[in-house]
Image: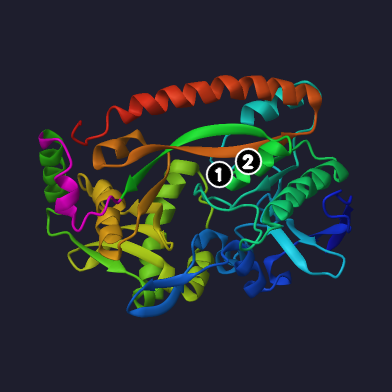
């Protein structure tokens, strides 16, 4: 691991150091998870098992990506996790960070910036990406542990550390994506540029059942969803929820076939390999939900979800048989059913997809922050983002008028 020193601040004069961990195994799981999620609580009154606030920030998830080879030098995602320490070697903060040689698997698109900079003679790659690979889910990126009067200091110091890393390694830029409000504020204060986009989330407003949710919809929309769900389960199709011990290697084999079929058609080369699913199934079984469709004795489709303390995160879907509306049933309706059963507050159904509106998912603004080292490129990006934010806000307002909920 490499080490870089940060300059002292007037409000906390001791020197801090920025250590670079090139793999998750160099960091204690307990320490990392304590920084990422300092206040775990029991998932329900009957279980002492602790659910993570955000499963993608756990040591288990990030290390599975590395150990399976889904991220690494060959994949163009070189781990460079930044660890902030005081003079005694005590770890104060951390961030999941990667040197990127491309812009794939990020869901916040900067190909236009890269093309413009390189056409002008610049070198855009490598860049620093602060995110969870292949995962467009909002969560902490500046991991500073819980509370305390110096929490904001640690967050600001980590922002400065990111800028120091970017400068010392001669990188064009640093990008932090799918940010919480606290992280966004700290990064903006440190000179990062603000970018917005739109996702679609289901909000559980205290519904006790799917019928309670349907009762809040306009009559025509309610009837359409009931019909859609009936049609999805024709031809003898049944649905199973697999979690915990039910996540067998056989179930993963079936899902991986679905994932590869859909991923190959959608992206050309799927990001995740078979070993990754075995690793997360082994380490995070209670935080995973596979929604699987069965017909004539075999699985024909499935949707992968991760379970957080308050949120169900939809990630991947695939099938080997095409049936009307089965995608909507497994990915959106069943996700709502599970969230209501588990009393979760939100369902995040992944990036993009205006078709989610009709299924009760509402437009939500997502946020990222970008540090551009080159002054000319920074000015151009800043002008672009100002216009883009206005457009995203206008489109979000328009989409909000087309939800299926009863007006008034």
In the picture provided, is 167 more to the left or to the right than 327? right
Q: Nearer the viewer, residue 310 or 268?
A: 310
The magenta stretch is 204-219
Q: List x then y, in percent, for residue 331.
A: 31, 51
Secondary structure category for the residue under label 2: helix
Q: Quadrant of the C terminus?
A: top left
Q: Nearer the viewer, residue 149 or 93?
A: 149
CA gap, disc 2 and disc 1: 6 Å
Q: Nearer the viewer, residue 285 or 161?
A: 161
Say whether marks 2 and 1 touch (CB < 8 Å). yes
In the picture provided, is 402 more to the left or to the right than 277? left
Report which quarter residue 217 is drawn in.
Answer: top left
Q: List x then y, in percent, for residue 27.
A: 71, 70
Q: Residue at x 35, y 63 (%)?
A: 290
Please say whether residue 67 is visible from this viewpoint. no
In the picture provided, is 159 more to the left or to the right than 131? right
Query: Magenta-highlighted stretch: main secondary structure?
Result: loop
Q: Residue at x 47, y 26 (%)?
A: 392
Q: Quadrant of the N terminus?
A: bottom right
Report which quarter residue 324 is drawn in.
Answer: top left
Q: List x then y, in percent, for residue 83.
A: 75, 60
Question: Which dot marks residue 185?
Answer: 2
Q: List x then y, in percent, for residue 344.
A: 34, 59
Q: Is 49 one of the magenta-colored residues?
A: no
Q: Residues within 10 Å of mark 1 (few under 14, many from 20)?
A: few
Residue at image mark 1: 181
Secondary structure category for the residue under label 1: helix
């Amino acid at each position: 691991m490499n080490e870089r020193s940060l300059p002292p601040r007037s409000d906390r004069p001791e020197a801090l150091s920025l250590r670079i961990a090139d793999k998750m195994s160099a960091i204690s799981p307990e320490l990392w998870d304590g920084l990422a999620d300092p206040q775990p609580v029991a998932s329900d009154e009957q279980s002492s098992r602790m659910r993570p606030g955000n499963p993608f920030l756990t040591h288990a998830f990030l290390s599975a990506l590395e150990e399976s080879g889904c991220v690494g030098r060959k994949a163009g995602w070189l781990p460079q996790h930044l660890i902030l320490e005081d003079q005694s070697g005590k770890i104060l903060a951390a961030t999941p960070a990667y040197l990127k040689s491309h812009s794939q698997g990020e869901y916040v698109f900067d190909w236009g910036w890269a093309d413009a900079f390189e056409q002008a003679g610049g070198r855009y790659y490598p860049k620093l990406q602060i995110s969870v690979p292949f995962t467009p889910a909002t969560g902490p990126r500046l991991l500073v542990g819980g509370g305390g009067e110096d929490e904001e200091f640690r967050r600001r110091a980590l922002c400065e550390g990111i800028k120091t890393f970017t400068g010392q390694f001669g990188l064009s830029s640093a990008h932090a994506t799918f940010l919480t409000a606290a992280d966004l504020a700290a990064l903006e204060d440190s000179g990062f540029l603000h970018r917005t986009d739109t996702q679609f989330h289901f909000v559980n407003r205290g519904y006790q059942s799917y019928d309670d949710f349907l009762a809040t919809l306009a009559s025509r929309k309610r009837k359409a969803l009931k019909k859609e769900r009936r049609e999805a389960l024709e031809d003898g199709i049944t649905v199973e929820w697999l979690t915990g011990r039910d996540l067998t290697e056989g179930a993963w084999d079936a899902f991986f076939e679905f994932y590869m079929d859909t991923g190959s058609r959608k992206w050309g080369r799927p990001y995740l390999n078979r070993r990754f699913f075995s690793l997360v199934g082994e380490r995070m079984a209670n935080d995973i939900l596979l929604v699987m469709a069965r017909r004539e004795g075999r699985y024909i489709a499935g949707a992968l979800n991760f379970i957080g303390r308050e949120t169900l995160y939809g990630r991947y879907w695939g099938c080997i048989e095409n049936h009307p509306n089965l995608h909507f049933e497994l990915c959106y309706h069943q996700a709502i059913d599970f969230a209501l059963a588990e009393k979760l507050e939100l369902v995040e159904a992944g990036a993009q997809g205006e078709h989610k509106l009709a299924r009760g998912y509402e437009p939500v603004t997502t946020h990222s922050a970008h540090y551009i080292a080159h002054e000319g490129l920074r000015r151009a990006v800043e002008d672009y983002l100002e216009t883009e934010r206005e457009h995203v806000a206008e489109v979000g307002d328009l989409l909000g008028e087309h939800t299926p909920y009863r007006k008034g």
